[in-house]
Amino acid sequence: MTETKFDALIVGAGFAGLYMLHKLRGMGMSARVLETGSGVGGTWYWNRYPGARCDIGSLEYSYQFSAELQQEWHWSERYAPQPEILDYANHVADRFDLRRDIQFNTRVLSATFNDATNDWTLETSTGDRLTATHCIMATGCLSSANTPDFDGMDSFNGTTYHTGKWPHEGVDFSGLRVGIIGTGSSAIQSIPIIAEQATHLTVFQRTANYAVPAHNGPMDPDIERAIKADYAGFRARNAANRTGTSTVVNMQSALTVSEDDRDQIYEERWEVGGLQFRGAFSDLIFDLDANETAADFVRAKIRASVKDPATAELLSPTNTFGCKRLCVDTDYYATYNRDNVSLVDVSETPVDAITPEGVTVGGERYALDAIVLATGFDAMTGALAKIDIRGAGGTPLTDKWAAGPRTYLGLATAGFPNLFTITGPGSPSVLSNMIPSIEHHVEWIADCVGYMRDNNHATIDPTLESEDAWVEHVNEIANTTLYPTCNSWYLGANVPGKPRVFMPYIGVPPYVEKCAKVANNGYEGFSFS
């Protein structure tokens, strides 16, 4: 066992961990990143399932801290595929010489605050015991795979895969009978590709999801040239939008235009493709009647795409449009027109069990050679819950968060001094463009740590009052929208037994403004020792 002291320990070598390391190094601070995997990239290291790609445009789902990096890197597609995003993460790690301070194949087992010495001690799977003044969790929002506990899970004679833990060597489904459980984003991306390989693909769907076409293709050189000519302006305009993306919101209400004009606007957005569809009207996520116009439009598109009326009806969502993560697809609905694809509804009659031969639903047996679990993640808190984190007085974080996560600004939680969470619950995170949100948090944390160093502060900790007020504010904002109206992973509803709490903060510009105000007022809402 080795014991070493650092200014900061960073858990996770995804985009957050890489930039945090680079930023602290630039301040002359000693830091080490601890990473479970054998390489950098975070969610893009683990999620290698067929068709995995980003649903935000490549030119904005990328770092902006280095103008040179922005200009030099060329994305080959409008929406970058997973291998290319992973190449980008590796390029960044090499370009800024980050690997020498990253310890791979190392799982953090525990993180404990020492009240006497005002520092954190992390114990790892490799037997190391590392100590630091600051502990920074860059563990990601979608990094803890949610594996369902079906009866007989271990009895299956074939091979079981999870989209969030895909084999690095890839999988060939040729000649196999494949079952996929789940129809969220990873399923919607992978089903068309698996269907092309498999002898037969059976999709087990609990809840139908809305998907809009990606219309992905090669990067348009004219668009790339125009954005790179004014990258700073492009980023600033995106940052002014609610989601921090290039989605332009039409400020009209869906209810104040004629039906023909409304359908034309939806059609134009549909043809553009991607998440721009969410911005067709300003009130889609606030007004149920307005929302239903978008839902009806997408359901009509599904019925027009899927030849079998019964299958089309099963694929047509009944929940609020956009209250779950809106998916972006390539030929998803058309895939159900293939003779080798069938859809099984498990909403009313759930999966009974996994058997040695396959899956049983309502007593009916489906013989399979391979099962794909596209069952998502224990989002936003799952990765933290896997680490035994203990704050002042030995309080476990899991105890403090037993009724749901409580943070101040999504950056810190009271009673856990010098512990920072990058894109934690209570920040825009998954309802924003993740990489700019990561950069914002990294820079805020770096400034805060620098402020502490300059003013000889040993610890920083949010006050309970500021944390309570922030949690109340996050919920208040969420409740003005339709987001909490359906069972989504934003609420933790996909994980049995997880408290139902709406976790992300809605609105990038007011959030950034609040964080700046807190810092400019001497980190109001925090206490120092």
Image: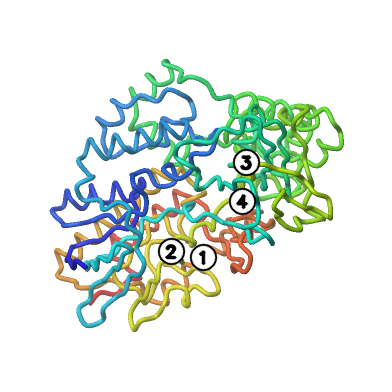
Residue underneath mark 4: 375
Q: Is residue 186 above or below residue 35?
A: above
Q: Nearer the viewer, residue 280 or 427?
A: 427
Of pointers 2 and 1, the one earlier in the residue sequence: 2
- Find numbered disc 4 in the image and state the secondary structure of the residue it sits on: loop
The residue under label 3 is which amino acid type?
Answer: Ala
Q: Is residue 428 visible?
A: no
Of pointers 1 and 3, the one earlier in the residue sequence: 3
Are the residues flagged by discs 2 and 4 in contact, CB closer than 8 Å? no
**Whole-Å distance between the Cαs marked 4 and 1?**
30 Å
Residue underneath mark 3: 187
Q: Nearer the viewer, mark 4 or mark 1?
A: 4
**Whole-Å distance between the Cαs marked 2 and 3?**
25 Å
Left or right placement of residue 264 versus residue 224 in this view: right
Q: Nearer the viewer, mark 2 or mark 1?
A: 2
Q: At x 84% / y 55%, what residue is drawn?
A: 363
| Labelled disc at residue 473 | 1
**Whole-Å distance between the Cαs marked 1 and 3?**
34 Å
Of pointers 4 and 3, the one earlier in the residue sequence: 3
Q: Nearer the viewer, residue 128 or 478?
A: 128
Of pointers 2 and 3, the one earlier in the residue sequence: 3
Of pointers 4 and 1, the one earlier in the residue sequence: 4
The residue under label 1 is which amino acid type?
Answer: His
Are the residues flagged by discs 4 and 3 in contact, CB closer than 8 Å? no
Q: Residue furthest top?
A: 222
The residue under label 2 is which amino acid type?
Answer: Leu
Q: Is residue 9 visible?
A: yes
The residue under label 4 is which amino acid type?
Answer: Thr
